[in-house]
Each structure stands twice: as C-alpha cells, then as structure tokens.
Amino acid sequence: MTNVTAASTGWRDLLAEGRFSRFALICLGVWLNAADALVTATIMPSVGADLGGYAYFSWAVAGFLVGAILAGASAGRLAEIFGLRQASALAGVACMIGCAMSAAAPNVGVFLAGRLVQGTSCGWISGFSMVAIALLFPERHLARVFASVSGVWGVATVLGPLVGGIFAEAGAWRGVFWLFAVQAGLFSLAALWLLRGSGRAAQRSGVPWLQLGVLTVGVAAIALADVIHVFWMALALVAVGVAILGLVLWIDNRARVRLLPRRAGDLRTVVGAGYSAMFWMTAASMGFAIYGPPILQTLRGLSPLWAGYVIGVESIAWTIAAVAVASAGEKWDAIWVRTGGVMLVASLVILTWAMAGGPLWVVLVGGALLGAAFGLSWSFMTRRIMAVLSDEDRAIGTSATIAIRQTGAAAGAAISGAAANIVGFSTGLTTQSAQAAAIWVFASVIPVGLIGAWAAFRLTGKAARP
C-alpha cells in the first residue's frame, strides 16, 4: 500500500508549506497569456474604427500567437540557462513594454507590433509557469495543479474578450492594455520574491537555433494565411505551415540539443499522441472566441459586453468541468479525455447550425460543450504526458504543452480567418458577411476537430507507449 493519503493529495496540503503564493503566481502567469491572447476579440471593431486595418482583424490574435509560440517553445531551455526566477522577472518586464506599445499605438502597425511583443513575453511567462509546476510541486499534487491551470485557462480564454467588451463599451479600448501592463509588472515583482531558491532544471548546453528557425518559418506561413483572401491559397499556406512543423519534429529528433522531448512527433507514443490531440483540438476551438463576439454583435444586435457574456459560457463550463474531475484517479483518464474529444466535435456541429440564426440558447449549449470538452480532458492529457517524461526532458516537455496549444491556436485562427475572409468578413462587418461567416467559421474546422478526437482516443488507447 502507498503512503500517500487523501489528506496529502488534497487542496489543504497542496497550498501548504509556502506553495500557496507560488501557486497564485503560476495562475497569474497562465491568466496573462490566455486572457491577453484573445482580449482583442471584442475590441477590434473599436480598434478598426480608430486605427483602421479591418483586413488584419485576425492578426491581432495571430501576431500575438506567433510570438507566444516561439517563446513557449524556448521557455524550457531559457529556464535552464538563466534560472527560473530571473527569466520570469524579465518576461514580465517585456510584457509591460508590449502592452504599453499597443495602448499608445498611433496606427495599426504599431498596435500589431505591440501584440507581437506581448505574445513573445506572455509565451515566456506561461512557459516558465509550467516549468515552475514541474520543479516546485510534488507529483502527488500534479493532477490538481493542472486542473487548476486548465480552469484558469478556461476562465481567461473567455474573460479576456469580456474584459475587452467592458472597455469597448466605455469607449476606452486602450485602457485594457494599461490594465495588462500593471498585471505584468506585478508578476515580475512577485517572481523576484517568490521564486528565490527555485533553482534550475538540469542544464544542458546550447540553444536549438535550427529548430527555432524552422519553427519560425512554419508559424509565419500559418499566420500569413490569415490575410490571404483566396480560400484555397490560405488553406495551402496552413498545410505548408503544418508540414514545416512536422519538419521541426523530424529535425529535433535527430538534434544534439533538442527543443522537445524525445519522439514528440511519434503518434505511437504518449507524448506524440498527446501533443497531437492538444494541437488539433485547440485549432478546432478558435473560431468561437475570435469570431463569436463580432458575429453576435452584427446578427443579433448584442453590445460588446453582452456578446462577451454569451461567449463566457465556454469559460464557465470549462472551469466547472475541470474542477469537477480534478480529484479523479488515473483509471478515469481515458474516459474523460475521450469524452472531451467527442464533446468538442458535437459542439462544432451545433455551433455551425446555431450561430447563423438558431435560438440563442442553442448557441449557449454549443459554447458550453466546447468549454466542457477542454475542462474534462486537458489536465489528464498533461498528466499523462508528464508521467512518461524523463527527468532531463521534464522542463522542455512541460513548457512545450503551452507552445503546442498556441501553435494549434494559430492554425485554428488561420483556418477560421480564411473561411471568414473568403465570405467578405475582411471588408467590414455587414449582415451578409457575418451570416456567411457564422456558418463557415465553424464548418471549416469540423474535420480538424475529428482529427483531435482521434488523437485523444489514441493517447488513451493500448497502442500508445512511453
């Protein structure tokens, strides 16, 4: 019999011995990344009216994600080189600078440059937070910590647009970035204080420059698809970008200094199947958060704030589901992961029909299923991956989950953006363009969701091995 008791795995023990403050810091780091990634969803109509640039609507998200992906992929290695405390504090300062750039932007170019800086810094912040989990929390608490992180991500994913809606309603969209700048400053100061003595992951020399360079090309190809108005060309760019990401995996598996854990691209392994499920499921979910608010505002006459509340049902369901299954044992992993994959596909089918003109309560059901799909499955996917990582791969493997998620988000934003732009969304918000986008933004990613569900089943099947 094991000596681990229910009390030693409960919330009280999790937050004891000085872990509460570090737990709060990790949650703040995850919040900054997830909320800032999508805060523009409800303010872009205001930004477009003020600065112009409707054709670059999705670049406000895609530009953020480009920086976040590259940063998240390198976070584990930087934590090894510089130490968790110093790296986290510097990332917070960089985030403050990026937020100030967008807040004070005189034109859309500076605004988007600020988003790129925010994405890079927030990717580091979130990646370092995941490294902190691996280094600072005992294994008995990992399920609850990851469930909490999943809940924070769910809340932030939709509260980001909601916060943006509040500022847009007040006619002060720039204020949202000053708010995030303050939070980034608090994170930086808290990291210097709370991460003292946190040590470093087992350090290995070198930086995987080749993999990072090829990754940059792949992510750039995916991001460029957002501004291509010819549908087949946009999808071709996404396909090329995904193929280049596959090349990164091939190179990394043969490199002396690796960016990812061993065999991360092998779908026969737990890590490979888990990363694949995270990538494709996230890609399938992006349309609701990015295009849901403007579609609801245009077709149903909702204010930015109320559109944010409707989208907020995803966050509520995500959080409730994550907390509900937080204490589930390993024997439940397969059930909840597979349930999440099925619910994701079901939600996309429902939203394809309901967003264009179905009853609003059906839209709420679709959003709730979408959130619950991640709340039920995400922490167990992460726990399965961490359980098979070697000590030398733990830092890079854990932080990579953020980069994988956000690479999927970029791909999903590009696919949804291509579908929206081809029906006229890029020329402005009209009833006709919103009506068409309400269908195709979601229909275009149903095949993506099916791939994600398949990978989730493979992750939890007998064929997957360490």
Image: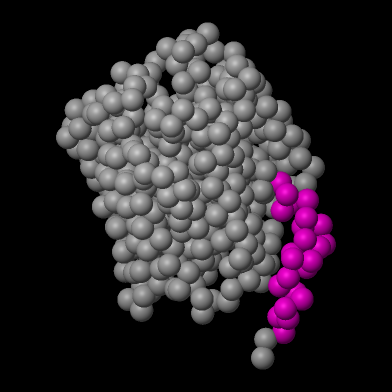
What span is in magenta? 3-25
In the rendered image, residue 381, in percent from the top left (x then y), is placed at 48, 64
Extreme residue in the left direction: 232
Q: Which residue is more in the foreground, 272 or 52?
A: 52
In the rendered image, residue 425, in percent from the top left (x then y), is placed at 31, 25
User: Residue at horizontal 23%, vertical 29%?
Assistant: 422
Rendered-image quadrant of the N terminus: bottom right
User: Residue at horizontal 63%, vertical 20%?
Assistant: 170
In the rendered view, tell whether residue 161 sits above or below residue 246. above
In the picture, measured across the screen, residue 417 lies left or right of residue 232, that is right
Q: Which residue is more in the foreground, 80 or 419?
A: 419
Q: Quadrant of residue 55?
A: top left
Magenta: predominant secondary structure element? helix
Extreme residue in the bottom direction: 1
In the rendered image, residue 89, in percent from the top left (x then y), is placed at 68, 36
Q: Is residue 462 visible?
A: yes
Extreme residue in the front direction: 359
In the rendered image, residue 208, in percent from the top left (x then y), is placed at 42, 44
